[in-house]
Amino acid sequence: MKMKSAKQKAFMNDMITYAMVIIAFAVVQVLLAGGHMSSLMKGLLVPLCTYSIMAVSLNLVVGISGELSLGHAGFMCIGAFASALWTNIMKGTMDPKVSFVIAILIGAATAAFFGFLIGIPVLRLRGDYLAIVTLAFGEIIKNIMNAVYLGVDSAGIHVTLKDSNALGLEKGGKIIIKGAQGITGTPKMSSFTVGVILLLVALFIVQNLIRSQTGRAIMAIRDNRIAAESIGLDVTKFKLLAFTISAAIAGVGGVLYAHNLNTLQALSKNFGYNMSIMILVFVVMGGIGNIRGSVIAAVVLTLLPELLRGLSDYRMLIYAVVLILMMLFTSAPAFVAYREKLLAGFRKDKAADGPKAKEV
């Protein structure tokens, strides 16, 4: 009975998360239909979905697997450029919607491949090696994307690290990646509806992984590696699985990001170290291991600076205060105990109302 109630509780928690996203989507659609949303807020809808997907993917590594990744924006960058490259090559030869669906799969597969390559040697080690390697990986990918030139003609794909003239394209050939100028002309296929669908898929994958036998093995390794090894769990295999899935979901976030822009560039502000740290802040603020909290934190902390923009000099001060309060609410023992007390009181009142309802 206890196991059954635990499963029911987990199922209800998952349903609440899905319902929260769906209700938010419905509210936004009503506001859009009534013309009650500013152009600034409309422009933030797709980034909100992107950052939520990134936070969910990183929480799988940091919260569920117990590892630290400081270069998650690198996987986002790989997914963004791989998918934008595909849609630009296929432009005019394939239905845009079909091309976009394939681009999502390409972005996820490419990011997963690089996550797998990084994880094979690093996840065998103990300590902070993953944080160091992913940090370096994110910077390397960003710098490579700023240096590479890629073009297409009848002879195939041409790549160089020199300049566009060194590509040697035939007449009529097309340059797609232009070094630091990035990729221009990517079809704008991302929308809030697509973002919500991808977010729900990411939530479904992560939450079902957590509830599965594999997820329980991953968390057992996180809690006590020696005990997990003693009962025969393959530590590297399970950590590598979680890291690869996380990288794939981050790649999907990159696809959504790339197809919301006319020009995709590998800048420090969108694929650099600061982006990786911002995603990590979403995870920490929402509660490490709390998937629903990651989504809420990503939305709140993305919207807050824009909503406070009218306060000018006080905007970042209030933002910092909110960060501190969120950290206390999700992590401080006194706040956590008070929160649990309130929830226990709510459950008690609900249980007490049950018999009364039956008597009536």
Image (cartoon, helix red, strand yellow):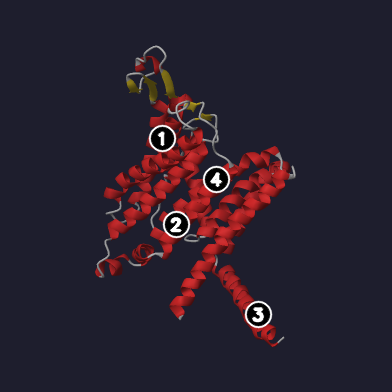
Task: Say which quadrant the N terminus sits in.
Answer: bottom left
Residue 82, which numbered label? 1
- Answer whether labels 1 and 4 touch (C-beta < 8 Å): no
Amino acid type at image mark 4: Gly
User: How far apart are the two marked residues, 1 and 2, measured between alpha carbons?
Assistant: 23 Å
- On the image, the x and y values in percent for residue 89 come to 42, 27
Mark 4 element type: helix
Residue 206, which numbered label? 2
Q: Which residue is drawn at 48% across and 52% down?
A: 201
129 or 193: nearer the eye?
Answer: 193
Amino acid type at image mark 1: Ala
Q: Can residue 52 be seen in this view?
A: no
Q: Which of marks 1 and 2 is nearer the N terminus?
A: 1
In this figure, which residue is indicated by the disc labeled 4? 195
Q: Is 68 left or right of 43, judged from the image as shown?
A: left
In this figure, which residue is indicated by the disc labeled 3? 349
Q: Which residue is drawn at 69% across and 83% down?
A: 357
Q: Earlier in the sequence, mark 4 or mark 3?
A: 4
Name the quadrant containing residue 111.
Answer: top left
Q: Which of marks 3 and 2 is nearer the N terminus?
A: 2
- Answer whether labels 4 and 3 touch (C-beta < 8 Å): no
- Answer whether labels 3 and 2 touch (C-beta < 8 Å): no
- On the image, the x and y values in percent for residue 260 come to 55, 36
Task: Say which quadrant the C terminus sits in.
Answer: bottom right
- Report the number of discs: 4
